[in-house]
Amino acid sequence: MRKEESFIEIIQSYMNWEEVDPAKLWTNTLDTLYMTFASLVAVLLLGLILGLILYETNKREGKLAKVIYYITTLFVNVFRSIPFIILIVLLIPFTRALLNTMTGPTAGLPALILSAAPFYGRLVETSFRDVDKGVIEAAEAMGASKFEIITKVLIPESLPSLISGITVTAISLIGFSAIAGIIGAGGLGNMAYLDGFQRSRNTVTLVATVTIVAIVFVLQAIGDFIVKKIDKR
């Protein structure tokens, strides 16, 4: 009976809804969305640039192209390899110097951007490589410039894959933002850990977790919908 009662008590500890402050939940949800989408804009731009550099310099002749490819690859591989929690700690001096603080949603942005941009850059490179070479050669034969090939061939032809990639990256950023919240960046991760786990409020942890899962589901659904609309295959 003791084990059964203990199990029931555990279940009941997740149902104490009076522990959850709706105003605090809303504020932390907005903080998570801010960290995710503010960093996502920067990741989209930097990832496209990194992916384009990797695509254009890979297997190109000439020392300059090889040096640029090596440096870019080194940057991408290094920052993709560092676990996010370690990257946050590593960037504390940089973040403090840049923002004059280590707390709040904005303080989490440098680590979020540096962790996700290289990841998305590799996805962009792969997307560009999958573009039919015949389409590119046809554009070159018609006298298209390099800029026109990039903007009118590479990006449009790989757009479904690019959107799928940014959707995956956005979902990763939500997970990273939860980790950033634990060390003071705010958001649902902060709520789940400090207000929930540290104070033995299981319901708060549960609600914060469910909210994160709901955001992920919505983002994935939006990404899938857009890909279906624009994919002509």
Image (spheres, rainbow, N blue to C red):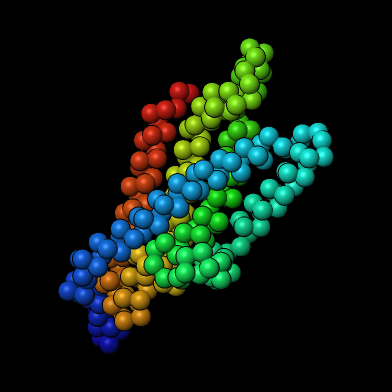
On the rendered structure, is 65 left or right of 79? right
Q: Is residue 182 visible?
A: no
* Residue 185 image offset from top left, x and y in percent: 41, 67
* Residue 77 image offset from top left, x and y in percent: 66, 54
Q: Is residue 178 above or below residue 125?
A: below
On the rendered structure, is 6 left or right of 130? left
Q: Is residue 8 above or below residue 124?
A: below
- Name which residue lies at 31% across and 76% down: 195
Front residue of 59 and 18? 59
Quarter placement of the N terminus: bottom left
Looking at this rendering, what residue extends furthest in the left direction?
Answer: 18
Q: Is residue 200 visible?
A: yes
* Residue 216 image offset from top left, x and y in percent: 37, 52
On the rendered structure, is 83 left or right of 174? right
* Residue 4 image offset from top left, x and y in percent: 27, 81
Q: Is residue 99 above or below residue 216?
A: below
- Name which residue lies at 51% across and 59% down: 110
- Name which residue lies at 55% across and 50% down: 117
Q: Is residue 60 above or below residue 175?
A: above
Front residue of 97 and 40? 97
Q: How many numbered marks are there?
A: 0
Image-quadrant location for residue 29:
bottom left
Front residue of 88 and 10? 88
